Amino acid sequence: MNLLGRLLPAVPVTFRENHSIDYDAMHRYAEYLTAQPIDGVAIWAHTGRGLQLSREQRLEVGKVWRQHLKPDQILICGIGGDEKQRRDMGTDALELDADAIMAYAPVMYRGLPDQDALVLEYHRELANYPGLPLILFFLYEAAGGITYSLDLLGELLSLPQTVGIKMATLDSVMTYQDVANYIQRHHPDKVLITGEDRMFGYTLTRGAQAALVGLGSICPHWQRELLDSYAEGRATDFLKAMILVDALAEITFIPPMEGYIERLLFFLAQQGLLPHTVVNDPYGPGITDQERAEIARFVKEHGLEVGA
């Protein structure tokens, strides 16, 4: 599976206010997004509340996206939780003919005396079952994840099923730099994937070769241009795209960070791509009137309404 240059949005779920899922709205959104310049999607990731969905919901969400993906677009499934949930998610990923799995950060092991051994075994289990290509997820501790030492990271990257690692360090640029340097020196065969919505462009200049980001679920054409202009050495175009993508992130990925999912849904509703009845994230803090006003202004200012 070739990940180089890929833009892979982590997609949200269209929850109604009563926490049920509006699959008609999801079909409409999936039809739109898969027609954009993306290379696939990641489902059941944090943006898609994969660990909170029931097994029935996960499968139905997966079937919606599998139905709309083009033959050259890939499907990545997030996997995590306890042992039973991991096995169920692996089985379901196989049923959906997923192209790869992405490991949730095993935060349940954080701070334990044998943390590194447990983290390694967790990933070995995922690598062996369901046996699909594995994408690691380095989520910095301050962002709610777990910090891997470089020694542990080397062992994880050495697993034969590991094809790449998604970095999401939030605001720790030094952590990103250190890991990027380590991968380039010791594991250049593994793909460094940016998950850094707030420093997207910068991470490309520091070695990221693909993007798997929640931000990709909105305005993916801007992010496609960011990836392509950097790869093609079009410096002026790259800077223009980076300014737009940064501005997009600066109104959606803001404190409280868990609110970004509902902000993305509201953004899509303001564009006319989703009904406002699905601007709900049962597991987030909600969205303020000020945030709604800022997003509405941004959408109008940039002519992002459907048909505009």
Image (cartoon, rainbow, N blue to C red):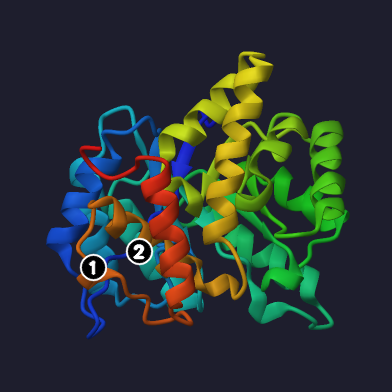
Mark 2 neighbour density, 10 Å: few (under 14) some (14–19) many (20 or more) = many
Q: Are the residues tagged 1 and 2 within 8 Å (C-beta)? A: yes
Q: Give amino acid for label 2.
A: Phe
Q: CA distance from mark 1 to mark 2?
A: 7 Å
Give the SS element for disc 1: helix
Secondary structure beneath disc 2? helix
Q: Is residue 211 above or below residue 3?
A: below
Name the residue carrying label 1.
276
Q: Is residue 42 visible?
A: yes
Q: Is residue 206 above or below residue 54?
A: above
How many marks do you count on the picture? 2
In which quarter of the view is residue 143 placed?
A: bottom right
Q: Which residue is mark 2?
A: 266
Compared to residue 275, the image places residue 229 above or below, namely above
Relative to 149, say whether 145 is above or below. below
Q: Is residue 12 visible?
A: no
Q: Position of residue 308 (x, y in %)?
A: 25, 37
User: Image point 39% across, 34% down: which residue?
Assistant: 38
**Residue shown at the point (20%, 38%) measured from the top left:** 307
Q: Quadrant of residue 168?
A: bottom right
| Residue for point 87% across, 52% down | 174
* Drawn side of residue 196 relative to residue 32, left or right: right
| Quarter holding residue 278 | bottom left
In depth, the one of 165 and 151 nearer the eye is 165
